[in-house]
Amino acid sequence: MVHITGGGFKKNIVRILPDDVNAEVNLGSWKQPKFLTGLRKKATLIKRDVKNIQLWKFGIS
């Protein structure tokens, strides 16, 4: 577990890993909080829409 500050998960994951290590994030590997699932349905957000993922974090940061 890490404390993620400004820049969120996407910009900070590279800061915690050694230079010779890569990360792969699988958006389907955890459950989304129910309120985000409902919000996505109402706002017709697409799970793979990068801008929306960055905005709402989809429960990962």
Image (cartoon, rainbow, N blue to C red):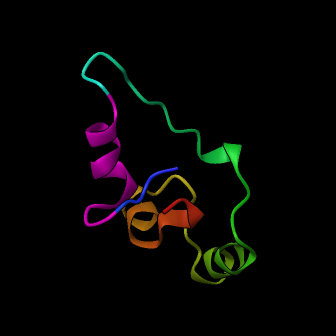
Q: Tell me where residue 51 appears, x and y as whole percent.
A: 36, 63
**How many discs mark residues in the rendered view?**
0
Q: Looking at this view, is 11 or 4 the one in front?
A: 4
Q: Tell me where residue 24 appears, x and y as whole percent.
A: 48, 31
Q: Is residue 22 magenta?
A: no
Location of residue 4 with respect to 38 vertically, above or below: above
Residue at 35% across / 43% down in the picture?
13
Q: Looking at this view, is 19 or 43 the one in front?
A: 19
Q: Quadrant of residue 31?
A: bottom right
Q: Which residues are magenta?
A: 5-17
Q: Quadrant of residue 54?
A: bottom left
Location of residue 46 with respect to 16 vertically, above or below: below
Q: Is residue 8 magenta?
A: yes
Residue at 31% across / 65% down in the picture?
5
Is the stretch drawn in magenta largely helix, strand or loop? helix
Q: Is residue 16 left or right of residue 34?
A: left
Q: Tell me where residue 33 appears, x and y as whole percent.
A: 70, 71
Q: Tell me where residue 53 appears, x and y as whole percent.
A: 46, 62
Q: Quadrant of residue 29?
A: top right
